[in-house]
Amino acid sequence: MNTAKSVIILVSCFLHFKCSISVANPNVDCLKSTTLEDAVSCFDKYTVKKDSYTQETYALAQPTSIERTAWKFVIHSLLSVDGSCDSVKLPEPLVDIYTISQFTDLSGPSYCVLSEVRTTEAGQYNKGWGLFITPSIPDDVKRDLHISAPHPAYDLNTPQQAVALFKSVGARSLLIDGRSRLALMQPSQCVESTEKATYYVTDPAHNKEEPFYDATRAIFDWQSSNGGCPSNHCAFIQLHGKGASTCPMDQMFVSAGLGTDPASLDWYATSPAKPFNLLLSSLQLAFPTWNVSSPLTSPCELTATKNVVGRFLNGVRDELVCSTPADPSVQEVEGYFVHVEQSMEARWKEAYVGWAKALKEAFEEVV
Ligand SMILES: *[C@@H]1O[C@H](CO)[C@@H](O)[C@H](O)[C@H]1NC(C)=O
């Protein structure tokens, strides 16, 4: 039905030579869904697409410093929600930009959804800071897992996979970016591009000015002041998708954002009780016919050493995340940043059951 609807919108958009979608508030459409998965898939359509911004329109879409503070504050508050999403007040600077809704899934649990209220003429998020979801009842949180999809509209199906896993394992938070990593096709001033790879401004893994980075920091702050992130039930899991020709032997390539230098390889080899290793082992058990690899077992270069979220979670100070990789001989690396690169089959629906089983086995329920 969603497909049929999109086709109608597309056809009417071409007939009118102007692609404006009549639904200006994504929530009107998306919150009618019966499952959280359908709601997230609906929101996914509003992601700011490749090459949508100019420098000017991007600057307008970025949060002011007051809005950025409010954005972090509301994310922090939503993690402490106690039953009713109404109890979390949207900070004043965000009232015309975001909304908090309580969404009850067909299967019973209800969630607080922080989502944008406006689109552009082209039917994309007006701001694109991201979508953030928490269970509204603390008892529904089974694990201190923070699941995120930083690359919607690019790493296909990762938002859908992220919400399915978030729901089925009782995770504490779900964060999905609102912009394609290619939304502004200018190089990031944070992590420098190389001859082999261009890192764009709107790629939240390589630019700390993206609101996704602030959101992760707010989640991390909350977790730090609420028991910390104990290895046996807590992790920050970033879901990615790789092209078929990149690291073709690996269905999953799991890393902690460290490199392949001796200190990092030693860390990988000698830290068996870190969230990273716990998830790696349980994914290997859940998918025995696949190559579920790590920097110890695969030459794959998608090691996430330049991922600014990973650097921050691995102990690099905020001021340094653009320039400085995490180094286990310098910082205490806790291993709660888990970066998973996946082939299409690994992020497809058929793998959700195995994935959820692996997460449940790797991480104990909170008591
Ligand atoms: C796993 O990797 C090996 C090489 O390291 C390769 O021969 C094999 O085909 C791969 N398996 C899968 C399922 O891709």
Image (spheres, helix red, strand yellow):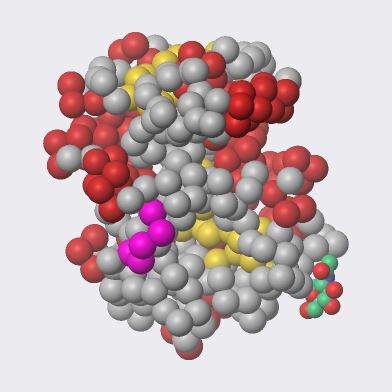
Q: Main secondary structure of the magenta part?
A: loop
Placement of 50 over or under 127, stated as above or below: below
Q: Quadrant of ligand 1?
A: bottom right
What is the quadrant of residue 208 in the picture?
bottom left
Q: Is residue 146 left or right of residue 327?
A: right
Residue furthest to the bottom in view is: 262
Residue 151 at least partly seen: yes
Q: Is residue 136 left or right of residue 186?
A: right
**Residue 12: x %, y % from top left:** 61, 24
**Residue 199: x %, y % from top left:** 41, 66
Q: Residue, x 48% and y 13% (percent of image)?
A: 28
Of 206 and 224, the residue lying toward us = 206
**Residue 233: x %, y % from top left:** 51, 45
Placement of 318 over or under 239, stated as above or below: below
Of 193 and 68, the residue lying toward us = 193
Placement of 323 over or under 240, stated as above or below: below
Of 168 and 244, the residue lying toward us = 244
Q: Is residue 254 left or right of residue 213?
A: right
Quadrant of the image for the N terminus?
top right
Q: Residue, x 69% and y 55% (percent of image)?
A: 282
Q: Is residue 366 left or right of residue 127?
A: right
Residue 6 at least partly seen: no
Q: Residue, x 24% and y 26% (percent of image)?
A: 94
Number of numbered tags placed on the structure image: 0
**Residue 219: x %, y % from top left:** 35, 42
Placement of 20 over or under 52, stated as above or below: above
Q: Residue, x 30% and y 47% (percent of image)?
A: 58
Q: Which residues are magenta?
A: 184-188
Residue furthest to the left in view is: 66
Question: Is 261 in the magenta?
Answer: no
